[in-house]
Image (tube, rainbow, N blue to C red):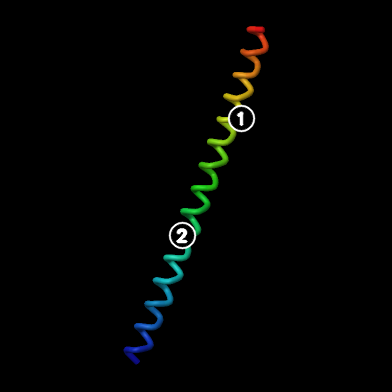
Amino acid sequence: MNHLHVDIARAQMSARLGEAEQARRSHQLARSIRMHRKAETAAQQARTALARAL
């Protein structure tokens, strides 16, 4: 009986760790997307400024 509780606890811990890892990956992806958008905006502003300077 005690062994069953240990197995259940391990399964729950594994599921929680999997959920935490997925949340971390999602957060990293969202951050990467935001950084990419900022970089694209900065590049466009730089192209505009260069075009005006010429």
Badge 2 or badge 1: first in the primary sequence: 2
Residue 40 placement (x, y as % from top left): 61, 30
Q: Nearer the viewer, residue 1 or 40?
A: 40
- Give coordinates of residue 20: x percent, y percent: 44, 60
Q: Which image quadrant: the C terminus?
A: top right
Name the secondary structure under disc 1.
helix
Residue 38 in percent (x, y) is at: 56, 30
For the N terminus, give its image quadrant: bottom left
Mark 2: amino acid: Glu
45, 27: nearer the viewer = 45
Residue of label 2 = 21
Q: Residue at x 46, y 53 (%)?
A: 24
Classify 38 as above or below 31: above
What kind of element bears circle 2?
Answer: helix
Tell me which residue sits at (59%, 33%) in the image. Answer: 37
- Look at 53% across and 42% down and name the residue there: 32
Q: Is residue 21 above or below residue 8?
A: above
Q: State the mark number for residue 40.
A: 1
Give the quarter of the image for residue 17.
bottom left
